[in-house]
Image (spheres, rainbow, N blue to C red):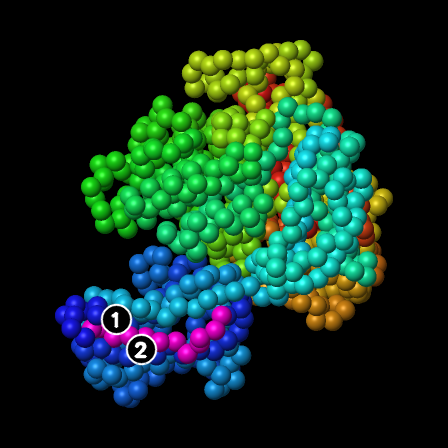
């Protein structure tokens, strides 16, 4: 080697695997580092780093017979000291195996052998990350001179993570179309971790509850169609609620589509969007091109926005983001907006998501923390107040976000910050909406993923701190264009879900015309229109003391309950079934968080013991992480490993008798013994401190056929202040949805 650079003479690394690795698979492999010209001095060290987003098994060094065991040896017999630290390097390469030479040194050619999943003591292997990545890199950094100044080797080892065989099929339809209006059906094969997969070769039968023009009786999914089957040009000639069912060749049920409402006419149609996710150029995985392509081709989204942490967005990448939004913009098929995540420290305002109507806007970073080019540092806005001031007068929408940092919305600018994000892959955060309502803000509700795994619009949590399925936002718009979707965001005409695609229509009916404002009138002069019907997100002035609230829901799974809320108050809980319909099925739910910040995770590991009765069936709820499971030990005992970050999980169990015996629950948060007879139609709740942390028990029908809920309620209005009317729908499968409030005032 002729080069005199330290990097070119720092050494090299190889990996023992030369084949693709299946996501989530237990494997063993060896990384061999060979010292370069400088060797490594006494007390020098090596780091092997992976991305923050990876959920590869946590390396452990003490139990050779357990998964994820790693052994490390020096070829020259040098004494080593090593540890794993999830934050021992500069992001996004946070997760680090740190290896220090404590006695001895390395000469050129000496080797360090790191055996992942070393089988010598009975280890079953190192579990690989659960999501696909063409270039899963194990970055090797060397401190050859014992100065704690690390140099990256020229080429670090790389693995190709690919999907496993198909275990699940997902069928998607739009949510509303007009009679005879064409639509498409998408069928997707997924592996057990939610990765779209080509590893399928199977024939299916299609049936529907309404006649569908263009729908074949049989389809085939094979590797040749990339695990995605599209049927274009479908239509329905009559009003109704369409469901399409997939059966295997023997007629056995496989899956069902989300509901599609067919109407005679409608001014607004629902469009599904993912407004918040990242790629490998910041802290996610896979490229920004892959990000947009996945949203369009695999997730079947109508709207997609990329939101990278601003302090990692170089000027070059900011230009790239805008090139991508232009390239993928295809009005009528896919709408994009440029934007970024303003990522200020919590004390300076916390996370905000910034969306621009069009390209060409200036990025106003919270800091240049990981951007070395300081030529535009004067454009920085180090606080949310400064950000709002700089964005005033621009075509910009902001929404508050809870991620690692959370948004402190004591700082707020209503003309810009139109909504709050109350669900993402980080968890569920209704407290953020409650903060806004307490302060008198008029905001809508969005739900997204903040996904880091390269699957926008289909963001499974995998085995990681992201404990929830990523959310979706459904926007009501006249057409799928930038202008019309932008109007929907400005006027809060949308609802958020935890990733399910349900039909939701929430509106108010006035006896006499009221005034619906284009902008929030408490923030300045604005135009108004006379209306008697208001929809979610509207701000309405009325002289009436009561209104009719009209609610129409078609869920993607049986409905457990619906809450009607006026601001911070739940004014009614509606269940679609009667008290006389409940049976022997008991639901146990754990929920909440420790507090608002990064350490919000709450561990619910525990067990249940039933006395004087027996458990005949059980079904986990919101247990997406296959390492967090509920297990039935025998007819009277269940045990589980579980964590919540603001959302909820749990299980249903079918008992032999709904009256006999008692249920003892032991967790790290709650211990209780509840007579089975006391678990009834209404929630039995035990608070557990923290942030809305609690245990909930309720009895359900043995079989719940209720996917629809239509009702009308007379809602009395408070004479002073706002009446933010909205609903929260909970499905039996654990998914939820929230309508943006309708703000009524006198």
Q: Position of residue 601 (x, y in %)?
A: 49, 55
Q: Position of residue 281 (x, y in %)?
A: 37, 52
- In this view, the residue in front, 108 or 103, is 108
Picture residue at 74% right of the left edge, 64% below the top: 610
The quarter of the picture where residue 30 lies is: bottom left
| Rendered position, 692 above or below 103 | above
Mark number for residue 142? 1
Picture residue at 46% right of the left edge, 81% below the top: 118
The span picked out in magenta is 9-20
In reply to whether residue 17 is colored magenta, the answer given is: yes
Mark 1 residue element: strand
Quadrant where the N terminus is found in the figure: bottom left
Whether residue 421 is visible to the viewer of this picture, yes or no, is no
The quarter of the picture where residue 544 lies is: top right
Quadrant where the C terminus is found in the figure: top right
Pair 2/1: label in front = 2
Q: Position of residue 349 (x, y in %)?
A: 36, 38
Q: How many marks?
A: 2
Q: For the residue carrying disc 2, how many other residues have a C-alpha within 10 Å: few (<14), some (14-19), or many (20+)? A: many
Whether residue 466 is visible to the viewer of this picture, yes or no, is yes
Disc 2 designates what residue? 33
| For residue 511, side relative to residue 7 (left or right) | right
- In this view, the residue in front, 3 or 601, is 3
Mark 2 residue element: strand
| For residue 502, side relative to residue 526 (left or right) | right
The answer to whether the residue labelled 2 contacts the one labelled 1, judged by CB atoms less than 8 Å apart, is yes
| For residue 64, side relative to residue 347 (left or right) | right
Q: Position of residue 293 (x, y in %)?
A: 50, 48
| Rendered position, 360 above or below 534 | below
In reply to whether residue 222 is colored magenta, the answer given is: no
Picture residue at 39% right of the left edge, 68% below the top: 158
């Amino acid at each position: 080697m002729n080069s005199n650079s330290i990097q070119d003479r720092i050494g090299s690394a190889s990996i023992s695997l030369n084949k693709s690795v299946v996501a989530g698979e237990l494997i063993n492999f060896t990384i061999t580092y060979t010292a370069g010209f400088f060797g490594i001095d006494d007390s020098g060290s090596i780091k092997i780093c992976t991305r923050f987003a990876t959920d590869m098994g946590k390396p452990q060094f003490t139990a050779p017979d357990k998964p994820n065991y790693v052994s490390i040896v020096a070829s020259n017999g040098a004494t080593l000291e090593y540890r794993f630290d999830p934050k021992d390097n500069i992001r996004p390469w946070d997760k680090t195996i740190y290896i220090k030479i404590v006695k001895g040194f390395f000469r050129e050619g000496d080797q360090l052998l790191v055996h992942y999943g070393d089988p010598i003591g009975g280890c079953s292997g190192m579990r690989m990350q659960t999501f696909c990545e063409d270039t899963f890199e194990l970055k090797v950094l060397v401190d050859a001179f014992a100065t704690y100044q690390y140099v990256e080797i020229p080429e670090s080892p790389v693995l190709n993570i690919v999907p496993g065989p198909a275990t699940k099929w997902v069928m998607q339809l739009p949510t509303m179309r007009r009679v005879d209006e064409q639509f498409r059906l998408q069928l997707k094969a997924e592996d057990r971790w939610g990765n779209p997969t080509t590893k399928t070769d199977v024939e299916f039968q299609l049936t529907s509850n309404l006649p569908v023009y263009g729908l074949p009786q049989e389809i085939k999914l094979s590797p040749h169609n990339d695990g995605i089957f599209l049927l274009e040009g479908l239509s329905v000639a009559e009003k109704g609620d369409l469901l399409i069912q997939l059966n295997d060749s023997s007629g056995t049920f496989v899956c069902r589509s989300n509901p599609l409402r067919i109407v005679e006419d409608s001014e607004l149609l629902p469009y599904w969007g993912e407004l918040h996710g990242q790629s490998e150029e910041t802290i996610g995985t896979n490229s920004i091109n892959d990000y947009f392509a996945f949203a369009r081709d695999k997730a079947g989204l109508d709207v997609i926005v990329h939101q990278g942490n601003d302090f990692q967005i170089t000027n070059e990448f900011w230009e790239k983001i805008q090139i991508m939004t232009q390239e993928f913009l295809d009005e009528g098929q896919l709408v994009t907006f440029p934007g970024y995540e303003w990522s200020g420290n919590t004390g300076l305002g916390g996370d905000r998501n910034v969306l621009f109507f069009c390209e060409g806007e200036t990025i106003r970073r919270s800091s240049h923390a990981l951007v070395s080019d300081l030529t535009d540092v004067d454009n920085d806005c180090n606080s949310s107040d400064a950000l709002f001031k700089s964005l005033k007068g621009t075509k910009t929408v902001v929404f508050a976000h809870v991620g690692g940092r959370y948004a402190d919305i004591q700082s707020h600018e209503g003309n810009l910050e139109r909504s709050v994000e109350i669900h993402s892959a980080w968890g569920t955060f209704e407290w953020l909406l409650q903060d806004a309502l307490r302060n008198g803000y008029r905001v809508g509700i969005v739900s997204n993923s903040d996904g880091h795994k390269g699957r926008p619009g289909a963001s499974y949590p995998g085995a990681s701190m992201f404990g929830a399925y990523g959310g979706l936002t459904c926007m009501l718009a006249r057409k799928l264009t930038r202008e019309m979707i932008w109007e929907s965001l400005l006027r809060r005409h949308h609802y958020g879900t935890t990733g399910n695609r349900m039909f939701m229509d929430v509106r108010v009916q006035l006896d006499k015309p009221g005034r619906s404002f284009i902008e929030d009138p408490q923030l300045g002069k604005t135009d108004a229109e006379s209306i008697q019907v208001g929809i979610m997100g509207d701000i309405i002035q009325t002289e009436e003391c009561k209104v009719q609230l009209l609610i129409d829901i078609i869920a993607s799974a049986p409905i457990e309950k619906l809450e009607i809320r006026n601001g911070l108050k739940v004014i009614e809980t509606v269940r679609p079934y009667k008290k006389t319909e409940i049976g022997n099925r008991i639901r146990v739910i754990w929920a909440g968080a420790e507090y608002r910040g990064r350490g919000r995770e709450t561990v619910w590991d525990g067990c249940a013991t039933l006395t004087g009765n027996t458990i005949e069936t059980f079904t986990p709820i919101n247990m997406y992480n296959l390492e967090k499971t509920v297990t039935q030990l025998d007819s009277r005992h269940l045990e589980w490993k579980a964590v919540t970050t603001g959302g909820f999980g749990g299980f249903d169990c079918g008992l032999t008798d709904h009256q006999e015996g008692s249920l003892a629950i032991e967790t790290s948060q709650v211990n209780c013994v509840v007579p089975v007879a006391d678990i009834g139609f209404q929630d039995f709740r035990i608070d557990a401190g923290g942030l809305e942390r609690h245990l909930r028990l309720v009895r359900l029908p043995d079989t719940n056929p209720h996917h629809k809920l239509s009702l009308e309620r007379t809602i009395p209005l408070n004479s002073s202040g706002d009446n933010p009317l909205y609903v929260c729908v909970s499905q039996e499968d654990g998914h939820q949805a929230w309508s943006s409030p309708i703000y009524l005032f006198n």
